Image (cartoon, grey):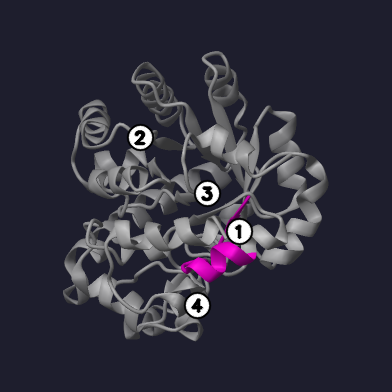
Amino acid sequence: MTQSLFLKHTGSEIPVICGAMYPCSNAELVAAVSAAGGIGIVQPLSLIMGHKQNFQESLVAIQQMTKAPIGMNIITEKSSKIYQQRMEAYLNIALQLGVRFFVTSLGNPRWVTEKVHSVGGYVYHTVVERKWALKALENGVDGLICVNNRAGGHAGHKSLETLFDELSDLKVPLVAAGGLSTAADLRHALLVGYQGIQMGTRFIATHECSAHSDYKKAIVDANEYDIVLTEKISGVPVSVILTESVKKMGLRAGPIARALLKHPRFKHWARMFYTLRSFWSLKQAASKGVSYRDFWQAGKSVAGIKSIQSVQEIMNEMRAASST
């Protein structure tokens, strides 16, 4: 198996995924990453809830911005029947418009892999450890996004190297995610044995991303020791930049929230409640800047982000790194 298998699956020229981010995955950012040789991933809820756009019209607009392939993220957690029906509808629209690469996260991806494989597409699932990787493979995924302990959002708990060693015998393409923002990071991941990388925080600090300038500046100014895990957003640890607001809010969820999130009967409803609440808060924080007393998600990759750049500039560096 060679690195080209990942490139075959994505249709990209450079082994770089722009990870799906709520609400930062605006249409212009997704299109710019794909146009520059990587693959941008559409996040449906980001387009619909974060940017108040029609999903199908947004996909068409992205495809008008670039003829290069794009991907789509599907959160497969079955929190409600309505949510499931909407995700299935978004998947059908994407397939009709020619999208053939999908990244799933949480829950069982079987219903996605069956539909995508029927039209010759590929599905990669997001995992943080081996047991979830094995379950995903049992349900037909073609590759794995390996989230390590330096990631933004819902970070893993193992290092990039440890996670590769744990999963390298599974004979599918592995993509490193977490703490990656530079050409040197890409070279290191490829040397370890990954076939590509996924970056999120790096692409927030770009001209094409619609996030507030205060958010971008906070990423540029932060170092990796400013990244902390808080349970107050979604009930489970999420990586954010340590600000005064985060300090006042605290980092631990209360005992009732923790109990509900683990309860076999109520955990799905609890996750849905926290997800909806966090979506609203993330949107406010990303769009209103320091005037809104909340939080900014980011990973330890802030250590390598020294300025706000264009997507093309970043991808030129990544292209050079992947060819050496």
- At label 1, counting other C-alpha atoms closer than 10 Å, the crowd grade (few under 14, some 14-19, many 20 or more) is some
**Of marks 1 and 4, which one's residue comes earlier in the chain?**
4
**Of marks 4 and 2, which one's residue comes earlier in the chain?**
2
Q: Is residue 77 visible?
A: no
Kindly report the distance in space between the C-alpha atoms of the residues bearing marks 3 and 4. 28 Å
Q: Position of residue 140 (x, y in %)?
A: 68, 27
Residue hosting label 3: 15
Q: Is residue 165 above or below residue 54?
A: below
Residue hosting label 2: 68
Amino acid found under the numbered disc labelled 2: Ala
Q: Quadrant of residue 65?
A: top left
Kindly report the distance in space between the C-alpha atoms of the residues bearing marks 1 and 4. 22 Å
Kindly report the distance in space between the C-alpha atoms of the residues bearing marks 4 and 2. 36 Å
Residue hosting label 1: 259
Helix, strand or loop under label 2 = loop
Residues rendered magenta in the picture: 175-188
Q: From the image, which quarter does the N terminus lie in?
A: top right
Q: Answer whether labels 1 and 4 touch (C-beta < 8 Å).
A: no
Return the mark for residue 276.
none
**Of marks 2 and 3, which one's residue comes earlier in the chain?**
3
Amino acid found under the numbered disc labelled 3: Pro
Q: Answer whether labels 1 and 2 touch (C-beta < 8 Å).
A: no
Kindly report the distance in space between the C-alpha atoms of the residues bearing marks 1 and 2. 45 Å
Residue hosting label 4: 228
Q: Is residue 200 toward the left or the right of residue 61 in the image?
A: right
Kindly report the distance in space between the C-alpha atoms of the residues bearing marks 2 and 3. 14 Å
